[in-house]
């Protein structure tokens, strides 16, 4: 007959519980935050349910939109390691999908001293004023990083997102994944909280973090990953390039993203410097 | 509740945490995080949600530190908050088949040395399913005793019952669990 007491103790020792390694840090980081009422949190989650983000570890599956659709639903989301895609995977032909997604106007305000790696597929640089006007988005420039090397407006989403490119510096070293120091972007969307809570890969980690001045944030660290998001009910691959460490944070109706080969602490400092 | 004299006692950490020392509260969390995660998992049935449940509960515990009457019993006090959070997490969606899906999806690591194990993979799966099938009250006392590792006295404190009640309730829960295991 099975020794139930010993079996229970052994089961307790052996059951795998993801995400526990960060518990102390996650709790301590939240100690000073204002109390959020359940109803408030639920409202945020419901709003977020309209738009979901998915971080996928080294994802290279055929028919990715179909795959993402299969993973939707809190109880069925799985982040599955796939065939490792090359870091310089061909970018989507963003300009060809929508002629209005990028502009050919010359950049009059951003410096262009460093060429943007063509594999990023960001197209020509534009001025910040032009980018803000076209996408209807706020200036995402972090004061800590200062003036970007170049500014771009790309799709998705249909309305466009602003991407700032930074060359390597002491703060943001050259990333072997993106080929630049840092990428900062802003686009209109909401982070779906529960969705990211489930997003655990073999070699990449996703954790919720507090970002100063933001409604919530997530830090994706480790293996390169790709981002997908829901744009008007259809899942779009944001880019085909693989991302390095990434900080996502929600502010109002916009999501900001910082991609750089840096620590979480540095990322939080940079994020906090976005006006 | 420390075992080494060089480490601060739970009472010391509670005192410091109440004075605003977040690191002291972090030390308490670190001390009991394994128990908190396991408790959240076994009461909710969801290993995927356990970390979120434990985090939410422990943040609430920090806010409620002033209500802790006996700092030496901070462990059962914190774990009781975790257990309540796990129960609240299930509110409105705890039908039996859903429970069995959650417990049945547990991933159980292999023992480094199989000879030290009393559970093979099938047994572990069946035991998890049996936990899903017994009543919530039975599951809770087993969770405190065998997953969180609380003593009878601590479990009594967490459940707010007499120590003798814990003993009898544990025996009944084990008997019901055995019945469920026998139905496989």
Image (cartoon, rainbow, N blue to C red):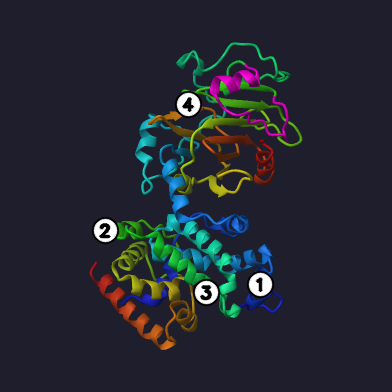
Q: How many marks?
A: 4
- For label 2, the residue is B97
Q: Earlier in the sequence, mark 2 or mark 3?
A: 3
Which residue has dot 4 on it? Answer: A157
Chain of the residue displaying label 4: A
Question: Which quarter of the image is occupied by the N terminus of chain A?
Answer: bottom left
Q: Secondary structure at mark 4?
A: loop
Mark 2: few/some/many CA within 10 Å (<14, 14-19, 20+): few
Q: Which residue is mark 3?
A: B77
Do pointers 2 and 1 mark residues of a single chain? yes
Estimate the spatial distance between the alpha carbons at disc 2 and disc 3, rounded to whole Å: 31 Å
Give the chain letter at badge 2: B
Question: Is A164 in front, or is A130?
Answer: A130
Q: CA distance from mark 3 to mark 1?
A: 14 Å
Question: Mark 2, mark 3: which one is toward the viewer?
Answer: 3
Along the horizontal axis of the image, is B158 left or right of B72? left
Q: Nearer the viewer, mark 2 or mark 1?
A: 1
**Which residue is label 1 attached to?**
B13
Examine the rendered structure and indicate whether residue A200 appears above or below residue A257. below
Which residue appears at 43% of the width and 54% of the height?
B48
Does residue B38 lie above or below B93 as drawn? below
Badge 3 marks a residue whose secondary structure is: helix
Q: CA distance from mark 4 to mark 3?
A: 48 Å
Q: Residue at x 47, y 72 (%)?
A: B80
């Amino acid at each position: 007959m099975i020794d139930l007491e010993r079996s229970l103790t052994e089961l307790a020792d052996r059951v795998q519980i993801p995400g526990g390694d960060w518990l102390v840090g996650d709790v301590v980081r939240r100690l000073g935050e204002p109390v959020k009422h359940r109803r408030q949190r639920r409202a945020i989650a419901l709003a977020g349910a309209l738009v979901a983000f998915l971080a996928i570890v080294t994802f290279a599956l055929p028919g990715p939109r179909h795959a993402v659709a299969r993973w939707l639903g809190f109880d069925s989301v799985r982040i599955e390691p796939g065939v490792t895609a090359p870091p310089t995977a061909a970018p989507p032909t963003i300009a060809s999908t929508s002629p209005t997604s990028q502009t050919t106007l010359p950049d009059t305000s951003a410096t262009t001293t460093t060429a943007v790696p063509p594999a990023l597929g960001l197209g020509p640089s534009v001025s910040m004023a032009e980018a803000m006007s076209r996408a209807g988005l706020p200036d995402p420039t972090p004061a800590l990083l200062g003036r970007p090397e170049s500014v771009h407006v790309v799709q998705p989403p249909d309305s466009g997102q602003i991407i700032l490119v930074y060359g390597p510096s002491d703060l943001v070293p050259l990333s072997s994944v993106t080929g630049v120091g840092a990428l900062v972007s802003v686009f209109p969307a909401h982070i779906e909280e529960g969705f990211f809570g489930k997003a655990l890969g073999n070699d990449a980690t996703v954790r919720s973090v507090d970002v100063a001045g933001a409604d919530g944030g997530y830090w994706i660290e480790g293996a390169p990953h790709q981002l997908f998001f829901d744009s008007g009910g259809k899942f779009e691959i944001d880019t085909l390039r693989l991302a390095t460490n990434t900080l996502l944070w929600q502010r109002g109706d916009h999501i900001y993203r910082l991609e750089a080969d840096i620590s979480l602490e540095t990322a939080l400092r940079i994020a906090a410097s976005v006006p | 509740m420390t075992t080494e004299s060089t480490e601060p006692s739970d009472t010391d950490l509670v005192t410091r945490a109440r004075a605003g020392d977040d690191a002291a509260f972090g030390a308490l969390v670190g001390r009991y995080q394994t128990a908190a995660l396991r408790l959240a998992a076994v009461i909710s049935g969801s290993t995927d949600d356990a970390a979120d449940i434990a985090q939410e509960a422990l943040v609430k515990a920090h806010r409620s530190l002033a209500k802790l009457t006996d700092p030496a019993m901070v462990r059962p006090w914190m774990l009781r908050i975790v257990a309540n959070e796990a129960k609240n997490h299930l509110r409105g969606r705890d039908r039996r088949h859903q429970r069995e899906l959650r417990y049945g999806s547990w991933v159980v690591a292999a023992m480094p040395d199989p000879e030290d194990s009393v559970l093979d993979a099938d047994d572990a799966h069946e035991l998890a399913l049996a936990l899903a099938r017994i009543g919530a009250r039975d599951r809770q006392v087993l969770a405190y005793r065998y997953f969180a590792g609380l003593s009878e006295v601590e479990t009594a404190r967490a459940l707010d019952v007499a120590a003798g009640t814990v003993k009898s309730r544990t025996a009944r829960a084990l008997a019901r669990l055995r019945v469920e295991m026998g139905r496989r």
